[in-house]
């Protein structure tokens, strides 16, 4: 059974990655924040008494479901207001601040040149843009496997699909990203 402190520590440890993942999915910071908060509340309310080891997978599944619910609500909303297009605005889409997420990993990077820093930021922004262009299921599988570092089985459980589907989605995502980045002259 997770104590209140363990649950709180777990939620603190996943909030930034969950937010980033949600921003990739919904392309709107406010909506992403709502999704993450809703997921955290559901985890605390319904699964706070579970063992600490089960929390990561439960949270990933809840986050995926909340994201799918958000998309369903958007689809319903757009169907209801299809003739009232001015209710929707492109200006709502936030620009995620990449600099806020970059972490300096060793002392040598603290003294890097401005040119190197700008180049690194541009490459990261290009990668982020290409991730956003992936189809939803590929993006979800890719982010869970390589951003959240879940294994294939955990990703399949969180996505509600087979392990083979996860492998296929990840493979296609990696191929698409690789091709897109090569076309932009980015070699990793």
Image (cartoon, rainbow, N blue to C red):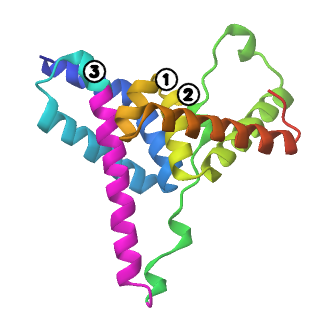
> How busy is the neighbourhood of tag 2: few (under 14 within 10 Å), some, or many (20 plus)?
few
Is residue 16 visible to the viewer in this orientation of the structure? no
On screen, residue 130 above or below 163:
below
Is there CB contact under 8 Å for labels 1 and 2? yes
Q: Which residue is mark 1?
A: 149
Image quarter hosting the N terminus = top left
Q: Determine if the magenta segment contains residue 60.
A: yes
Residue depicted at x 67% and y 35%: 174
Residue visible at 36% across and 44% down in the picture: 64
Give the distance between the C-alpha atoms of the residues marked 1 and 2, in whole angstroms: 5 Å
- Given residues 100 and 50, the one toward you in this image is 50
On screen, residue 75 versus residue 138, left or right, reads left
Whether tag 3 and tag 1 are in contact, CB under 8 A, the answer is no
| Label 1 element class | loop
Please provide percent x and percent y for residue 88. 47, 76
Residue 74 placement (x, y as % from top left)? 39, 68
Ranked by sequence position, the earlier of labels 2 and 3 is 3
Q: CA distance from mark 2 to mark 3?
A: 22 Å
Q: Which residues are magenta?
A: 57-83
Q: Which mark is residue 146?
A: 2
Q: Is residue 116 above or below residue 106?
A: below
Graded by Cα atoms within 10 Å as few (under 14), some (14 to 19) or many (20 or more), the crowding at tag 3 reads few
Q: Determine which residue is flagged by label 3.
A: 9
N-term-proximal mark, 3 vs 1: 3
Judged from this view, the residue extending furthest toward the top is 107
Q: What residue is at 59 percent from the left and 43 percent from the top?
A: 97
The front one of 124 and 46 is: 46
- 116 to the left or right of 25: right
User: Which callout, 3 or 1, points to the residue nearer the camera?
Assistant: 1
């Amino acid at each position: 059974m997770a104590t209140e402190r363990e649950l709180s520590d777990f939620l603190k440890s996943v909030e930034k990655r969950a937010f980033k993942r949600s921003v990739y999915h919904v392309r709107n910071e406010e909506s992403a924040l709502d999704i993450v908060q809703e997921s955290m509340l559901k985890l605390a309310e319904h699964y706070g008494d579970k063992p600490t080891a089960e929390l990561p997978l439960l949270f990933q599944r809840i986050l995926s479901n909340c994201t799918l619910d958000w998309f369903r609500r958007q689809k319903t909303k757009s169907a209801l207001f299809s003739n009232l297009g001015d209710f929707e605005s492109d200006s709502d889409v936030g620009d995620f601040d990449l600099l806020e997420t970059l972490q300096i990993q060793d002392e040598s990077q603290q003294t890097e040149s401005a040119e190197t820093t700008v180049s690194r930021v541009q490459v990261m922004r290009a990668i982020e843009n290409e991730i956003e262009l992936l189809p939803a299921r590929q993006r979800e599988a890719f982010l869970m496997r390589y951003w959240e570092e879940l294994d294939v089985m955990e990703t399949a459980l969180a996505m509600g699909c087979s392990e083979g589907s996860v492998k296929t989605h990840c493979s296609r995502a990696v191929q698409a990203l690789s091709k897109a980045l090569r076309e932009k002259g980015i070699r990793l």
